[in-house]
Image (cartoon, helix red, strand yellow):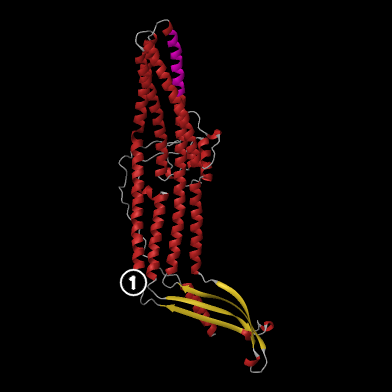
Amino acid sequence: MKKILSLSVLMSTLLLAGCMSMAPDYQRPSMPVADQWRSNTASATTQTNPATPLSEISWQSFFLDERLRKVIALALEHNRDLRVSVLNIEKARAEYRVQRSESLPSVSVGGTQTASRTAAAASTTGASSVGRQYSAEIGFSSYELDLFGRIRSLNDQALERFFATEETKRSAQLSLIAEVAGDWLTLATNQQLLTLAGNTLASQQKTLTLSEARHKVGAISGMDLAQIRTSVESARLDVAQQKAQIEQDRNALELVVGTAVPDALLPTGSSTRAVTLAQIPASLSSRVLLERPDVLSAEHTLKAANAEIGAARAAFFPTISLTASGGFSSDQLSGLFTGANRTWSFVPTVSIPIFNAGNLQASLKVSETERDIAVADYEKSIQTAFSEVADALAVRASMKEQLDAQKALVQASQAAYRLADARYRNGIDGYLDALDAQRTLYSAQQTQLSLYLTDLKNRVTLYKVLGGGMNAG
């Protein structure tokens, strides 16, 4: 009965171990930013579902071009930085399991045989003899009863760090999606710029052919002909530079993707419909930033630092460890497991810190300082996120006006070029006026394509900085 009572007391103690925690109660820090953004005037109807918040739109729905979606899928599979993030999650998960195992006793089974020979001179019988001892036991050693929550706090710390690595992976995934989309759209725009340069070169070459014929009959001067040849070579240079740029763009895209991108997945033609424009409510609260994966990662890191304080506080209190075993011992192997040969041992150990030259106090101070650093990092992550969104909204607010103005400028430049070219062909003006008009038109068309790219990249940036693609996979 006494053994049963002792066993019950021991089991109750084990069950109660770890129910206490000395970690401070976690309080999420207040947001160190304004409730809303000043430039939030960029509301626009989404091409998917106007009622769907941006953070809930999957990247498969946000990006409309099937080729771009396939390139992003390739990157999610092959990108090395993302692969490192996934491996870091596996590492953190394993570290959490290692730490969590400290909450439970480690049980082992062992068996031994001891043989010894006694010399005749040392024997009481006057003859040498060989003695054998057999034993088998099961037990655990140095199992710490977590009465003050030290191990529990360390478990919480490891778990929060695991959660932080998961959010870091999601943040890396979202950044990768945005980077791949930006590189793919840049390649598409430069292909359009190459087409524009090629068309300009073809137009200049036709003008040169016509002008050479007119020069032979004395209709135009040698100066006009030289200016036309200059414009042809300038256009030829632009074509060559755009071809080189396109190759560089493709190399950059394949580096981010992590593998070769098939020709069938490269952009062709216009890319103005490659991404959707999601709705941004005029009353968008900055609390949406709390769901960004990088902010969530910083918060989990803060919680881990908070738990570490609990472990440092618990170190000031006594540590109780248990070692226990039970088994059999006999000098005959055949009778090892008989009832009379049962053995057991129970060794509780109590360690009480008395003097440690301030080591425990210093460790607690370190933990508290790390918690304060984590608070500052968390607040900084929110401020950075707020600034990123503010910048993206500022661009979005004036984008339509810029596109409309540039479109009008292109139309005016086209009209001016047609008039100047007609006056040149009719011999009214020299070629210099027509050349200036053509350069103005060419520059306006290049700027228009660049603005289209800025518009598309801004949509991708808003999707990223507002935490879109949470369910990306």
Q: Is residue 220 within the magenta segment?
A: no
Quarter of the rendering containing residue 186: top left
Residue 128 pos. (x, y %) = 67, 90
Q: Residue at x 31, y 49 (%)?
A: 33
Label 1 sits on residue: 358
Asked which secondary structure carries label 1, the reply is loop
Q: Mark 1 Cα within 10 Å, few/some/many (few <14, many 20+)?
A: few
Give the residues drawn in magenta, as a range: 197-214
Residue 61 pos. (x, y %) = 49, 40
The answer to whether residue 160 of the structure is visible from this angle is: yes
For the stretch drawn in magenta, what is the main secondary structure? helix
Quarter of the rendering containing residue 404: top left
Left or right position of 470 against 354 = right
| Residue that protrudes farthest toward the front in the picture | 121
Q: Residue at x 38, y 62 (%)?
A: 306
Q: Residue at x 34, y 63 (%)?
A: 368
| Residue that protrudes farthest toward the right in the picture | 334
Q: Residue at x 34, y 53 (%)?
A: 379
Tell me which amino acid carries mark 1.
Gly
